[in-house]
Image: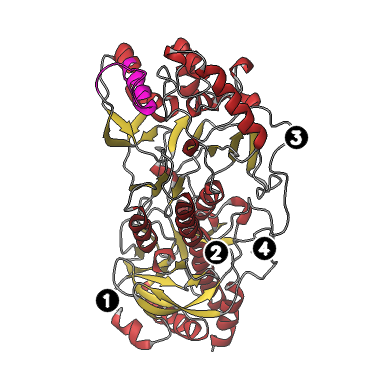
Amino acid sequence: MRSLTVADAARSALVVRALDDRRRDGAGHASTGPIRVVRVDGRHRRAVEVPGITAWAARARNLHILVALLEEAGIDHFCVRGTASVNPCVAVPERLRTDVEEVLRIVCGHNPGYVGSASRGQMRPGASAASWRALRAQRVLRLAWNVCDPTGNLVFGRESGCDIEFWAEREGRLVAPRPNRVVSEVPVDAGRCWAEQKRFSEVPVMYTTGQARTLPEFVAALPDDHPFPIDVVYTWVDDSDPRWRARKDATRRVLERGTGEHALHEQAANDSRYTSRDELRYSLRSIHQYAPWVRTIFLVTAGHVPSWLDTDFPGIKVVDHREIFSDPDALPTFNSHAIESQLHHIPELSEHFLYLNDDVFLGRPVQPGKFFHSNGLSKSFRSNALIPSGRADSADLPVNAAGKNSRGLIAQQFGTVISQKMKHTPHALRRSVLTEIEQVYAHSHRTTQHSRFRSPHDVPIVSSLYHYYAYHSARATVGDIRYAYVDLADGLAQRRLDGLLARRNFDTFCMNDTVPAADPVAQDRMVANFLDAYFPVPSPYERPTGIRAPRTAPVAELGGVRA
C-alpha cells in the first residue's frame, strides 16, 4: 500500500519550485494557496491558487508532480524530448499502466487533478475510475493539476499539462506510441540517466526544479535546439518628465523656424507618439509570462527609469542614449528611427535579439523558433499593408516616407522592389547584420541618426531595412506568426480587446495610437482595464508594492521617444 506515501509526495510537489523567494506577490505570501472553482474549457474545475504563476511554471509544476509521484511509487519511467507537442512528456512501460492509474487516481482524490487525451477532448477528473476506463484505449494521455492566479484571470489547465506515454514492449524493446525526433524504440533494459527538469519543461536556469530520469539519447543536443542566447531590447520614454518635455519643445521650435526639409509632419512629433500608459510594465509581464528563455532585457531611455522598475534584479539593464549613439552630436533625439539605428551598439547585447516597442505584447507562450531558426537565421513577418508607390515626399506620413526610403536602398543594392511593410511584432534581429548595414548604407544611416524628429529622409532600419537586407543576403527568412493589431482610436477597439482577452489565441499583439484620442480618459481606462486583466501577474522586474524609485535618473538631459 503506497497511497499515503504517494499522497504526501503530491502535497509537497504542489509548491511551484520554479519560483524562488524573489518571485513574491508583493506581500511575501507562500507559493500556493487555496483550491478554487474556475472555468476551464467551458466547465467548472478545481484549481490551486498560486500567486505569481506563469505559463512556464504551470507546465514545470505538472512535470514535477508527475515525476515525483512516479519516483516515490518506484514506477519505472523516463522523460522524453522531441515530440510534436511543447508539453513535457514522461514515458512509462505499458505493463505498468495499471500501477500508474492506481497511483494517480488516489493522488487526484487528495489533490484535484485531471486526465484526458493528449490530442483533444475534455479533461476528466483523475480521481474517477471511470475516467481511466474511458481512456484505456489511449496510449498517450494529458495530465494537469490546474492552477490560477489570485485574480482568477489566468487559469492554466490542459494546455500546460504534462503528457504520459505508455511504451509497448515488443521482442525485448520498448516502442514509442507516437513519433519523436530522437528514438522510436529502445531496449527494455536501456540504462537511465539524470538531467535537469528544465530541459524538459523550458524552465529558466535560475528556477531549476530538480533532476529527472531520462535516457542518454534525450539529453544530447538536437539540431532544432537554439544554443545561442536571445536578448530583448525596448525603447521607452517618460513623457511626464518636465525636463524632457521642455527639451523636446525647445528642439521642435528650433527646427520649425526653418522651412522645407525642416518642416515637421503633424505625425512626426504629436503627443500620441510619446504617451505612456505604463504599457512597458505589462509588456515586461508578457515576456516573463510567455518567454522564459529570454536572457537579458535592455531598456534604452533618455536617462529615465520607471518608478516601479527594479533595476537591481538580474536580467534587466537600463541603457542611456549616450551609451549607444556613435555621434553624441545627434542628441538629444525624439525620433524612434534614430534611436533604433543605434541599438546594435548596446554593450553586452547578444548577437540575436528581439526589439519591441512598449505597446507590443506576447499573447501566449512562444518558443525561440518563432523568431529564429536554430541555425541562427532570423525571421521577419510581412504585413499585407503596402508601401505607397513613388518617392518619399514631405507630405507623406512619416511611416510611409521611411518605407519608400527602405525600398530605394534595397532596389539599388539587390535590384528588387519591395512593397510590403512589416507587422508590428517583436522584430528578430542580428547584431552583426545591423553593424554591416551601418557600413553599407553609411550616408542614409548617418542621416537617420541625426534626424531629431521623424523626417522624410529617415530609414526604418530595424523595422524594414534589416529584414529585407538580411533576406536578400541569405540571413533571414519569412516567418509566420499569429498577430493582432488594435488601433485604440478605432470605434471597435473595445470589442477587439474583449476578444483578445476571451480567447488569448494570438502569439503577439500591438495596441497602437498615432493620433490623439477623442476621449483620453475613457481610452486610458479601457487600456488599463484590459492590461490588468490580461497580465495580472507582476514580473520580477517590478519593485514590491510601496517601494518607489526616482522617476528620472539624475542626468536625464537628453531626449527619448516611443516608437
* Image x and y of residue 21, in percent: 69, 61
Q: Can you say whether 153 is above or below 288 in the image?
A: below
Residue under label 2: 53
Q: Earlier in the sequence, mark 2 or mark 1?
A: 2
Three-letter amino acid code at disc 4?
Answer: Gly
**Residue at the location (27% across, 35% down)?**
385
Q: Which mark is residue 26?
A: 4
Q: Is residue 436 left or right of residue 380?
A: right
SS of the residue under disc 4: loop
Pointer 4 and pointer 3: residues touching (CB < 8 Å)? Answer: no
Work out how far the residue at label 4 is from the one at label 3, CA to CA, in angstroms: 27 Å
Magenta stretch bounds: 389-408
Tell me which numbered mark, 4 or 2, is placed earlier along the sequence: 4
Q: Secondary structure at mark 3?
A: loop
SS of the residue under disc 2? loop
Q: Is residue 556 magenta?
A: no
According to the picture, the residue beneath numbered tag 1 turns out to be 137
Lower sequence index among marks 4 and 3: 4
Please name the colour scheme applied to the rendered image: secondary structure
The kind of residue tagged 1 is: Ala
Is residue 475 visible in this depiction of the protein?
no
**Residue 456 percent coordinates (x, y):** 40, 19
Q: Which residue is mark 3?
A: 554
**Of labels 3 and 1, the one closer to you:** 3
Q: Could you classify mark 1 by the number of other residues whose Cα lies within 10 Å: few (under 14), some (14-19), or many (20 or more)?
A: few
Amino acid type at image mark 2: Ile
Local crowd at mark 3 within 10 Å, few (<14), some, or many (≥20)?
A: few
Quote the CA–CA distance across marks 3 and 1.
67 Å
Label 4 to label 2, Cα distance in Å?
13 Å
x, y (%) of residue 447?
Answer: 48, 14
Q: Which quadrant would the N terminus be assigned to in this image?
A: bottom right
1 or 4: mark nearer the eye:
4
